[in-house]
Image (cartoon, rainbow, N blue to C red):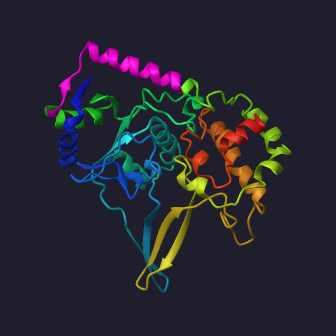
């Protein structure tokens, strides 16, 4: 394990940015989002969660995936793949790091999404351990250890010291490039981090949602949950606005659109929401015609469909964004409590 004084962080960021594009939680107009580092950037490593997750770096909100020209019966396909330059995302919390692993299950399964794969191969995830979780957090329910997050590199910011621990080969490569700014940690530092973790775990144990029970959400309970009369009450306040899906780090629904630009047809993909009435709309109509059906689909997928097909991994990481942002306070926590 290595460390650096917080007073030298700007030099540290500059060193990483000289090797590859560096993105961190940056405050602009009162909002904290991941943005590229600059000497005058207001970096907020103390901020628990950015408004949106770092999902955008691997699965962009909008991206071109194909282009082609049509001349009579002849179709010419254009390769729109662009080289992905190496980049690093610094300050990713444990919940968001796990969400990237969940997205890997979707986009790196056969057939592999080559656009996503290129970004994953060139992106380094530097995580930040949590120290002051909020009441909306419940990552521990899904077995996520926020005090010891995964990633290529894990960091702990304790007092005026940042501790740095490389976990993967990519992490080692980056560490070797900037090692001149870091000094070795010693046994006293290990004690500091251990105590830091213990105090944080005590806070997590006292959070309102720490006791959520997922035992009832199993493949065997599929029809029971699907046919529950409780959906009628749960969905009633839903506006179908899609806020929950767009701030969720694991949601991965998208739409494909073709646009005639005059000289060619451009095919792009953009985020979509299963909460929208026109999602998966086909010529014959939509298979889920009511808001109740769409609402149920979202939570059944996260709690039963996805884990049934992914070795028990739930499609939620307990980041709490939907708890804070839903305009009618309807979220996955209430669904788990009602149907559990």
Task: Tell me if residue 198 is in the magenta stretch.
Answer: yes
Q: Residue at the right extreme?
A: 229
Front residue of 137 and 225: 137
Front residue of 44 and 271: 44
In this picture, is 203 found above or below 118? above
Q: Quadrant of the C terminus?
A: top right
Q: Position of residue 269 (x, y in %)?
A: 50, 64
Q: Is residue 137 left or right of residue 296?
A: left
Q: Is residue 313 visible?
A: yes
In this picture, is 249 found above or below 135? below
Q: Which residues are magenta?
A: 181-203
Q: Residue at the left extreme?
A: 180
Q: Is residue 317 left or right of residue 60?
A: right
Q: Position of residue 186 (x, y in %)?
A: 24, 16
Q: Is residue 28 left or right of residue 9?
A: right
What residue is rendered at 24% in x and 27% in y? 3
Q: Is residue 227 visible?
A: no
Task: Tell me if residue 294 is in the magenta stretch.
Answer: no
Q: Position of residue 145 (x, y in %)?
A: 49, 27
What residue is rendered at 47% in x and 60% in y? 61
In this picture, is 7 found above or below 268? above
Front residue of 52 and 260: 52
Q: Main secondary structure of the magenta part?
A: helix
Q: Quadrant of the N terminus?
A: top left
What residue is rendered at 74% in x and 50% in y? 296
């Amino acid at each position: 394990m290595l460390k650096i004084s917080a007073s030298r962080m700007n030099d540290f960021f500059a060193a990483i940015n000289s090797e590859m594009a560096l993105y961190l939680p940056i405050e602009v107009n009162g909002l904290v989002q991941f943005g590229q580092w600059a000497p005058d950037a207001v970096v907020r490593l103390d901020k628990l969660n950015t408004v949106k997750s770092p999902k955008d770096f691997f699965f962009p909100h909008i991206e071109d995936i194909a282009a082609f020209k049509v001349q009579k019966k002849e179709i010419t396909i254009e390769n729109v793949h662009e080289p992905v330059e190496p980049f690093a995302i610094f300050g990713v919390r444990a919940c968001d790091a796990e969400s990237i692993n969940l997205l890997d299950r979707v986009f790196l399964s056969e057939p592999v999404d080559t656009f996503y794969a290129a970004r994953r191969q060139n992106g380094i995830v530097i995580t930040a351990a949590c120290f002051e979780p909020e009441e909306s957090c419940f990552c521990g329910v899904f077995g996520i250890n926020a005090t010891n997050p995964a990633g290529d590199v894990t960091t702990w910011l304790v007092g005026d010291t940042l501790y740095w621990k490389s976990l993967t080969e990519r992490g080692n490569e980056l560490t070797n490039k900037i090692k001149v700014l870091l000094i070795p940690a010693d046994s006293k530092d290990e004690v500091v981090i251990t105590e830091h973790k213990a105090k944080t775990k005590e806070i997590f144990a006292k959070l309102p949602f720490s006791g959520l029970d997922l035992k009832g959400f199993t493949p065997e309970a599929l029809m029971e949950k699907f046919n529950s009369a409780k959906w009628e009450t749960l969905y009633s306040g839903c506006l179908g606005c899609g806020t929950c899906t767009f701030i969720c780090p694991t949601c991965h629904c998208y739409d494909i659109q073709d646009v005639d630009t005059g000289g060619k047809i451009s095919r792009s993909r953009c985020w979509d929401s299963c909460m929208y009435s026109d999602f998966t709309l086909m010529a014959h109509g939509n298979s889920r015609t009511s808001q109740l059906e769409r609402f149920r689909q979202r939570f059944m997928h996260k709690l039963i469909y996805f884990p049934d097909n992914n070795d028990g991994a739930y499609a939620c990481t307990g980041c709490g964004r939907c708890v804070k942002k839903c305009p009618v306070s309807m979220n996955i926590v209430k669904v788990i409590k009602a149907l559990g």
